[in-house]
Image (cartoon, helix red, strand yellow):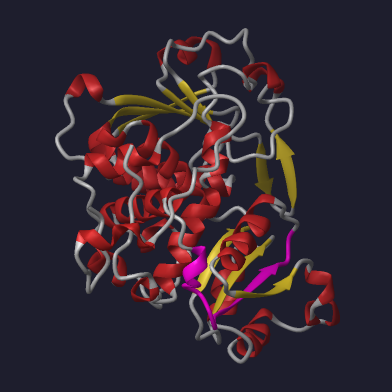
Amino acid sequence: MVMAPDSIPQKSANDLAQAKPGLNSKGGVLDPGKLLEAHGQTIDFERLHSLSGKSILGVEQLSRDSVIELCKFSALLERTEIASHHPLDGKICITAFFEASTRTRLSVERAVLRLDGKVLSVPDGKVTGVAKGESLEDIGEMFNSYGDLVIMRHPETDAVERISKNLTLPLINAGNGSGQHPTQALLDWYALLKWRPEFSLRELKPEKKIHLGIIGTPGSMRAVNSFLRMSLLFHDAIDRITVVSEMRDPLGPRLRELTENSSVELKCTDDVSNILPELDVIYMNSIAFLGDSYRQMDSRFSLSHKSTLKKGAVVLHPLARRQELSESLDASQHNLYFAQASGAVFMRQALLITILDRIRALPKSVLYLVS
């Protein structure tokens, strides 16, 4: 049984109604209960408490264990109805999106509202003082008086550092230029741990380890950057990583140093057709942020039903997609990207409850949905 701090006996479990998980319409469907079962229906809430009040600017703020506990907490929220208990009541979250966003902003705001928190939204940087020349440092100072937590997306890579100079509230980075997108990596790995819960366990047998392929350029794609960084935390589940990119140096100096110090073998190639049949998991994204503009990858790096995918291989994509990921794959079991997207709200709920120190605001006995 999954129990919250200050738990009460199991006989009170019926105090909460259980909701059906939000299922995707096509592709592989993931059962969050399997992740909980793999860990004996327990969540280490004390480890989650260590994230209370903390900012999440990049994957480096997270450990392997904290990622696993956040994923298990997300699984609990996906299988249990807690909205009626208002865990974020009285909390105000500022969603500051200085760059266009659909999925991230709406999933964050839905997560807040479903938990009965309140949202102050900046849907476009043009409606802020930035349009008049106000600095991010000063905006951070103003935010201190307006909310309890800030979720920010910005087209400039140094934006999180600049706003953090005066900001005293916890800050969640929702994408900074060509930097990182840590909450995207969290929901990416939430999908993978639901797909294969054994990835969250130690000492995986060699034949169970995966060949992970990344189609993109981690050094200039923030979602891919964060996904690679988080993947290295799960080195004991990965046999090797192959980065497929048209660029000669797809990593850049910081990521190259990080991968060189990892126990995971990593290689780079521009030959997608030869490596594709070997991959167990394919993570792809088509858009790279170069300087001050976006660039799409070449069409030869696209996937469709005609691609030579390995039997049982799955495809992840942060969405939105363009021609690099054909709709012809949507109805196949290779499609894990819809299930990946469907977990976004639950992961962000888990993160918000944790950072805002509202775990103890949950009911004394927190249900898990028995399969």
* Left or right of residue 163: residue 269: left
Q: How many discs mark residues in the rendered view?
A: 0
Q: Which of 188 and 349 is in front in this view?
A: 349
The quarter of the rendered structure image containing the C terminus is top left
On screen, 6 above or below 209? Answer: below
Q: Where is residue 316 in the image (x, y as percent from the top left)?
A: 52, 32
Q: Is residue 16 magenta?
A: no
* Left or right of residue 211: residue 248: right
Residue 216 appearing in the image: no
User: Which residue occupies 46% across, 72% down?
Assistant: 87
Q: Position of residue 230 (x, y in %)?
A: 38, 47
Q: Is residue 91 magenta?
A: yes
On screen, 27 above or below 101? Answer: above
- The magenta span reads 83-99
Displayed quadrant of residue 359: bottom left
Residue 68 appearing in the image: yes
User: Which residue occupies 60% across, 35% down?
Assistant: 285
Q: Which of 176 and 257 is in front in this view?
A: 176
On screen, 34 above or below 74? Answer: above
Displayed quadrant of residue 99: bottom right
User: Which residue occupies 14% across, 35% down?
Assistant: 203
* Left or right of residue 1: residue 246: right
Q: Where is residue 153 in the image (x, y as percent from the top left)?
A: 64, 63
User: Which residue occupies 53% across, 78% down?
Assistant: 89
